[in-house]
Image (cartoon, helix red, strand yellow):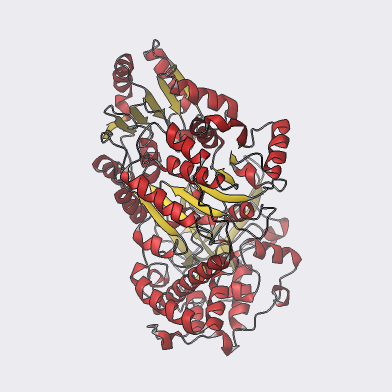
């Protein structure tokens, strides 16, 4: 393909170029691989009479009248009709010149969703084209819909992509993957043309993601091969980096073991040994520790931090929220009571004077362990010698942020070891692919003495009755989390806000000490509220999902999730994991509205039947897909343009074997495939 600079494509000026860059398009190759997310059928004009409300349709109408109204808001209304029925077309955003196009008797073609308005059938902001004469042909192929951005229209993208695919003439871009065992009858250019401009005889569901069209299969397989190649290349790059070997186990190590009140479980000991073996090497550790909620990942990380500091390096412990960072800081202070001056907490809530002191101490090396949020990524933060990075819930951080932390060493010849913690169990399919550059440890055992949490579901109309029962439970010594979906009243959602629930509980059981917590509170107020609950001064804590990760109150034994149908399965499991941390029997009650969808019902049933995080994650993947769970949009952890690992897992074995053959025998084509599919993302995958 003639890999043109974007400026050489007609219609691309500096402003459009910036917009294209913003969605990951930097050259014409990127345009070719900016693949459709949907299709529209504009090959056949439909009659209004034969169409259903809610259908996305292509119609041809004659303009009856056009007027601009200013009340209740400015809008342009076109009355039009086809041979069978009339329709209103409404535009809220338009320029005066557009109104001139809609003269009476002009013929227009419209593509949009058919709705039923106050005055009959209508379309709001459809795409349209003027029809010059009766012989104007319809499209001869399905119309692709792309991921776009503000100021970049679908028509512009279609034009630029058409030009880029047309410019594909350089045969050196075509790689003969069949000789490595790829089963496909199509070349890459044939597949691209089929995907961007499918002929009208191709069924949309066949060419859409999940369909079985040969062009779709060809592109999915090539992308999977490219990703496997990227992972192999990453492993090679990591093997050439140098890290400080951290073998000594001295005072800090003794401190954490002496101050941890329990014996480690067998699973924790196994993972600690795997980490110790890794950090004793010259090659930077890249290890992912996955363990279900409450399995004890933090103590494993604390032991790794202690051993690292005993070898005269610094440790950065990253948490996704201020509340979680503060909880980690308090726990770690308990493990290292003699070294309080060598610990620091750095978040957006840290006062300027304290931040300045911490910055200087990190640079001089006198602070050995810093716990922080995104504040650790700021440009003015540097370390004397950062030897270990611990990342809690990696998918909540952007890749660029994680990469920036690795480059903060003043000692540039060393790369720090990296330990990632996650409570999101990763199914084998994803572990094989997405984390192929990382070693994986699993804490598959809960601390002894814990009883399984009993989970039940209850209709919202039983809320008053539940509050009375909760009051009795608190009088008998229980502590309760009550989680709400929203902070304040919303017109959009039928969900009860925190303050309404707080007032209801206070009125119904006034003798029970109740407080509330949400993300909009000041960091100091949040911490004080959580600590009062920890000390038992509060019996019921009403909260948003701010308590989802990291809040550890062993005496809390009841979790109520109001409007449970509003939460995802993984989130419900995380919330439930806040209880059941002591030896007392714990209960989770899922309060839901009477009328809920099938997916919400599924989630509630899955949660009632199991507390196994791996089983729940597998079910969640089937319901939602991996991109949403792993946060691919935010982090680039799964930088796939076209592949869905769960849906397309049948191709995994074939593409893995092909990738191994190409990587070992053909470095030139390996590089080409990585650039083609992963440009702009693979360099961050080890972040």
Residue at the image position 64 percent from the left and 40 percent from the top:
71
User: Which quadrant is the C terminus positioned in?
Assistant: bottom right
Direction from residue 589 to residue 55 in the image, left or right: right
- Relative height, residue 558 to residue 278 (above, below): above
Residue 291, horizontal then vertical, whole percent: 38, 47
Residue at the image position 51 percent from the left and 77 percent from the top:
197
Residue 203, horizontal then vertical, whole percent: 39, 73
Say which quarter of the image contains residue 618: bottom left
Number of callouts:
0
Point out the residue furthest to the top here.
Answer: 511
- Relative height, residue 480 to residue 323 (above, below): above
Point out the residue furthest to the left here.
Answer: 609
Residue 224, horizontal then vertical, whole percent: 44, 71
Camera-side residue of 615 and 359? 359
- Residue 512 seen in this snapshot: yes
Say which quarter of the image contains residue 681: bottom right
Camera-side residue of 447 and 160? 447
Residue 583, horizontal then vertical, whole percent: 29, 28
- Relative height, residue 384 to residue 321 (above, below): below
- Relative height, residue 293 to residue 478 (above, below): below
Camera-side residue of 467 and 654? 654
User: Which quadrant is the N terminus positioned in?
Assistant: bottom right
Direction from residue 459 to residue 57 in the image, left or right: right
Residue at the image position 52 percent from the left and 38 percent from the top:
251
- Residue 425 seen in this snapshot: no
């Amino acid at each position: 393909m003639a890999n043109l600079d974007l400026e050489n494509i007609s219609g691309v000026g500096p402003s459009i170029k910036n917009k294209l860059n913003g969605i990951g398009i930097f050259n014409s190759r990127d345009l070719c691989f900016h693949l459709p997310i949907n299709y529209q059928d504009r090959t056949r004009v439909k009659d209004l009479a034969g169409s259903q409300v809610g259908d996305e349709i292509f119609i041809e109408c004659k303009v009856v009248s056009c007027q601009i109204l200013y009340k209740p808001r400015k809008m342009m209304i076109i009355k039009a009709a086809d041979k069978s029925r009339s329709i209103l077309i409404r535009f809220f955003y338009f320029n005066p010149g557009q109104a001139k196009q809609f003269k009476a008797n002009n013929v227009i073609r419209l593509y949009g969703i058919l709705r039923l308005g106050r005055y009959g059938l209508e379309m709001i902001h459809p795409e349209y084209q003027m029809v010059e004469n009766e012989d104007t042909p319809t499209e001869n192929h399905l119309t692709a819909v792309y991921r776009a951005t503000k100021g970049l229209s679908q028509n512009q993208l279609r034009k630029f992509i058409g030009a880029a695919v047309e410019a594909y003439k350089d045969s050196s871009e075509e790689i003969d993957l069949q000789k490595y065992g790829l089963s496909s009858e199509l070349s890459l250019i044939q597949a691209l043309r089929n995907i961007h401009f499918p002929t009208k005889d191709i069924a949309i569901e066949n060419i859409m993601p999940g369909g079985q069209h040969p062009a779709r299969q060809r592109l999915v397989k090539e992308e999977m091969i490219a990703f496997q190649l990227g992972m192999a290349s990453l492993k090679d790059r990591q093997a050439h980096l140098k890290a400080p070997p951290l073998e000594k186990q001295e005072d800090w190590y003794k401190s954490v073991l002496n101050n941890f009140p329990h014996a480690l479980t067998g699973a924790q000991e196994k993972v600690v040994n795997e980490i110790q073996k890794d950090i004793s090497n010259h090659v930077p550790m890249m290890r992912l520790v996955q363990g279900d909620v409450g399995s004890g990942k933090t103590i494993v990380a604390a032991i790794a931090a202690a051993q690292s500091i005993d070898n005269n390096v610094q440790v950065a412990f990253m948490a996704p929220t201020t509340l979680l960072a503060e909880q980690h800081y308090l726990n770690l202070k308990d493990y290292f009571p003699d070294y309080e001056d060598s610990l620091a907490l750095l978040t957006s809530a840290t006062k300027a004077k304290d931040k300045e002191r911490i910055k200087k101490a990190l640079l001089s090396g006198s602070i050995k362990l810093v716990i922080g949020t995104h504040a650790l990524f700021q440009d003015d933060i540097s370390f004397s010698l950062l030897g270990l990075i611990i990342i809690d819930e990696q998918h909540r951080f952007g890749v660029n942020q994680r990469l920036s932390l690795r480059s903060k060493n003043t000692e540039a010849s060393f790369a720090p070891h990296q330990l990632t913690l996650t409570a999101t169990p990763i199914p084998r399919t994803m572990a094989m692919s997405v984390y192929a550059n990382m070693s994986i440890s699993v804490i598959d055992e809960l601390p002894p003495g814990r009883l399984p949490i009993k989970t039940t579901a209850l209709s919202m109309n039983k809320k008053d009755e539940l509050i009375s029962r909760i009051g009795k439970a608190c009088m008998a010594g229980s502590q309760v989390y009550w989680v709400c979906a929203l902070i304040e009243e919303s017109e959009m959602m039928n969900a009860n806000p925190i303050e309404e629930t707080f007032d209801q509980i206070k009125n119904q059981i006034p003798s029970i000490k109740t407080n509330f917590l949400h993300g909009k509170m000041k960091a100091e107020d949040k911490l004080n509220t959580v600590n009062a609950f920890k000390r038992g001064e509060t019996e019921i804590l009403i909260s948003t999902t701010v308590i989802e990760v990291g809040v550890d109150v062993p005496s809390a034994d009841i979790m109520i999730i109001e409007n449970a149908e509003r939460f995802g399965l993984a989130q419900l499991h995380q919330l439930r994991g806040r209880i059941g941390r002591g030896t007392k029997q714990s209960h989770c009650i899922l309060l839901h509205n009477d009328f809920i969808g099938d997916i919400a019902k599924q989630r509630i049933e899955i949660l009632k039947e199991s507390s196994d995080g791996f089983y729940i994650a597998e079910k969640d993947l089937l319901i939602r897909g991996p991109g949403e769970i792993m946060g691919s949009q935010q982090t680039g952890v799964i930088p796939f343009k076209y592949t869905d690992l769960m849906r397309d897992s049948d191709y995994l074995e074939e593409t893995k074997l092909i990738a191994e053959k190409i990587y070992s025998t053909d470095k030139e084509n390996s590089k080409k495939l990585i650039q083609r599919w992963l440009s702009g993302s693979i360099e961050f995958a080890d972040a």
